[in-house]
Amino acid sequence: MRKIQLYFIILVISFPFLTSFETNPYNPKLQAIYQSPEGILFKSFSTQWNKSKLIDLYHELAKNKHGNELKLLRGVEVIGTTLDGSLSKGSYDYLNKTIKLYQGDHYQEPSQYQETLSHEYGHHFAYHYFPSHHFPLSKWQKIRNLNLLELRWDAFWNYQDKYHAIYPQEVFADDYVLLYGATKEVDPKDVETNEAFYLRTEHENQQISNVLENSSLHSLLEEETGIEIDQSRLLHMPKFNNYKNTALTFKIKPKTNMAYRLNLTLNDSKGNTFNYESYQIHRDESEGELIFHLEDLLNENLSNYEWLSASIDVIDLDTSIGFETEEWKMDIEDI
């Protein structure tokens, strides 16, 4: 217990000096400036970004659900180059309450920063309403059902990109993206080409529980912020039901405009592996099952194989929010 208390003391003492995610002092030439009605200063340090684009960027920011905390955001800066040579598109400076967007010379349209802007604003949102979320044993961490030992709590003094997905700050920011962030509709044609599944909005950390079905966390967020979560954007994981008569069946939460992609792997007795994909679009809210008839899909007898594994990719066509389920494995001979 004393070790935990000592850990907290060190964190609290360190916090005022270590709260900026900005590590690269950058002082290029200012190209354009715009002040939003809330007083947020949008600045361009890229020759590709003028005042008109900054205004459009503000409108992208405003698409995220927000409360009075928006007025406390001091600035959004677009910088033409990268941050320390990394591929990062954004960072949040806690001390200055400023969002910085990188690679502005390359990403020249405000819409290209939509998800990054939502994520970085998620940091601002988190530190306003849940200032202790980066501490172990915080109320948020407990209700989020996060395992202390599976996360890293040293972001302020030992930040490394390779651990990005397991810092609690980043988990919260991605939670914000899914629960409050700006959304966009998906063209069904992009489902056919698989592009929709690759470009969907999803949580970076796929090993933790699905935030979209954590009703206890939803209640906590709404209670602390006064900002309601739109029930229409919530998604539940498909649950494997059974395999019968060469058909894979999954239970799903009825919802309109949902696309599902089956990722199927089959292995034969010689150790050969075969991969298949098949997608379905559900328009009917009454549909509570997802069924894939494998022999129809493969156009051959499944007795040629020894075992199979399957997972489901999910995307909401109204919001572009989605995820991939865990993988289910089974021996075909034992079924």
Image (cartoon, grey):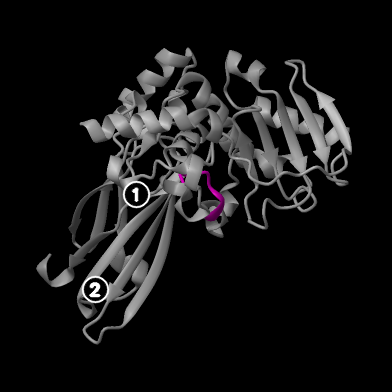
Q: Please tell me whether residue 200 belongs to the stretch shown in magenta.
A: yes
Q: Please tell me whether residue 335 belongs to the stretch shown in magenta.
A: no
Q: Is residue 13 above or below residue 111?
A: above
Crowd around label 2: few <14 · some 14–19 · many ≥20 (10 Å): some
Q: Could you tell me which secondary element the residue under label 1 belongs to? A: loop
Left or right of 307: which side holds 103? right
**What x and y, as percent, mark residue 63?**
64, 27
The residue sitting at 17% across, 58% down in the picture is 244
Point out which mark residue 207 bears. 1
> Label 1 amino acid?
Gln
The residue sitting at 27% across, 33% down in the picture is 4
Residue 134 showing in the rendered view: no
**What x and y, as percent, mark residue 70?**
63, 19
Between circles 1 and 2, the one closer to the viewer is 1
Q: Quadrant of residue 232?
A: top left
**What x and y, as percent, mark residue 187?**
60, 46
Q: Sequence-wise, which precedes: disc 1 or disc 2?
A: 1
Residue for badge 2: 302
The residue sitting at 35% across, 44% down in the picture is 151
Residue 19 showing in the rendered view: yes
Q: Could you tell me which secondary element the residue under label 2 belongs to? A: helix
Left or right of 288: which side holds 111? right
